[in-house]
Amino acid sequence: MFDKILIANRGEIALRIIRACKELGIKTLAVYSTADVDSLHVQLADEAICIGKATSQDSYLKIDRIISAAEIGDVDAIHPGYGFLAENAHFAEVCESCNIKFIGPKPAAIRAMGDKAVARETARKAGVPITPGSSGIVETDQAALKIAKQIGYPIMIKAVAGGGGRGMRQAHNDVSLVQGFNSARMEAEKAFNNGALYLEKLIENPHHIEFQILADKYGKIVHVGERDCSIQRRNQKLLEEAPSPYITPAVRKAMGRAAIKLAHAVEYENAGTLEFLVDDKMNFYFMEMNTRIQVEHPVTEEVYGVDLVKEQIKIAFGEKLSKDFDDLVPQKHAIEMRINAEDPFNDFRPSPGKIDLFYAPGGHGIRWDSHVYSGYTVPPYYDSMIGKLIAFGSDRATAMDRMSRALDEFIVRGIKTTVPFGQLILKDPDFRRGRYSTHFVEGFLKQRASILPPKEG
């Protein structure tokens, strides 16, 4: 097994990887920015090296500094986590050229699936359903208008290098298409240094279903079930659960086969996630692939009894997938709520600052993945997520009841969080019946505008 791994990330995912490494007997090297000097991943790793100033552009996105830290620390491998450089093919290539194992897929697979337009074409050739859309990158808003005329509105504008809901816009007519095209391009250029866009038909009121896959270097690829990620705001996920309360066993089987087929098409290796949209007639369409571990991976871990981060490390080291993966079946139901440092009653405005008092919930069927503690200062430079609350039980009702109970136990003083918003969702009758789509939060906010506390300022 590897002797030492560098974690090229921060926050809860860095801590998650450190824990997996410790259980495997692997030493860890943390890298951190000046803003993260007091972060738990720095304190709990075996070694830590500062790689730059607070902003990610000056630290966690600096490939040369991360590689220098890896060489100084004499590591065998680098785990990128999610975000930052996790889906950067060039970073994976640099790791390989320095004889450092990149814990993730090969650079070719990252490129093939990282460019959303190329990924759509790859899926089409593999016989996996895709939504109607452009055949590649759309260069101008005038070209976008011509495509819109062919496939019809509504249309979704997407950045080829997108993620986290950035570089995405909906268009319902020519005017909103031109405006959305240009604003999406500027946002994508700023976020990803790549303003290229493509278009696809907007599936109205869909469910967002993703399939977790694992693939070893010997050609064995399995899926570890699905997650329903339809509870989202502005294309950013807020809550995930598994199994999905929406899709049928037959659709689940067909989607799982499609996910494996597409992974084989790009000779995929390590962990990855295939994302699909499912319409109200149970038709499913490939949307994109995330060539990394997902934020919501704990949902799958609790339902199937696997450790996905450990599997990533084992695969990267060259181990074969166990035969146990051939017969995996859901053992529980799990729900994950992302807890962000945001004010949900003031348009989800970020709320960085010092946490004066913090108490996380516990008890049977509750898992809390986080890097924060009393006295910790949430920096303003990164994603606002401070942790993930996972509730699980023998069935969905039990998981929901435990999640509701756990949200009530939270004590956070000094910053605003999305805990109160999560409490409202768990009490919503439609959510409890499993009747929701990607537009659930939008409608939820409109219906409850009159009963929510007034905005500040």
Image (cartoon, rainbow, N blue to C red):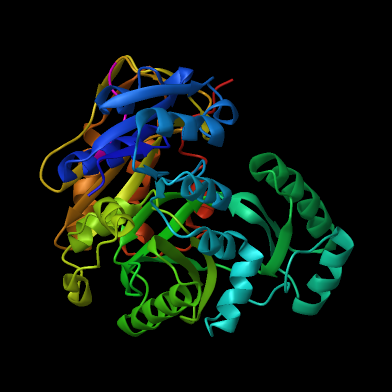
Find residue 245 and report its image quarter.
bottom left
In reply to whether residue 373 is colored magenta, the answer given is: yes
Q: How many marks?
A: 0
Image: 194 above or below 151 = above
Which stretch did the figure color magenta? 368-374
Image coordinates for residue 180, horizontal then vertical, percent: 76, 53
Q: Position of residue 432 (x, y in %)?
A: 31, 59
> Which residue is at the front of the view, 295 or 403?
295
Q: Position of residue 196 (x, y in %)?
A: 74, 55
Q: Is residue 388 visible?
A: yes
Question: For residue 157, which quarter of the picture?
Answer: bottom right
Q: Residue furthest left?
A: 364
- The answer to whether residue 155 shows anywhere in this view is no
Instruction: Choose between 363 and 326: the one closer to the eye.
Output: 326
Q: Is residue 20 magenta?
A: no
The answer to whether residue 164 is left or right of residue 320 is: right
**Quadrant of the rendering where the C terminus is positioned:** top right
The structure residue drawn at horizontal position 76% and vertical position 75%, both measured from the top left corner, is: 152
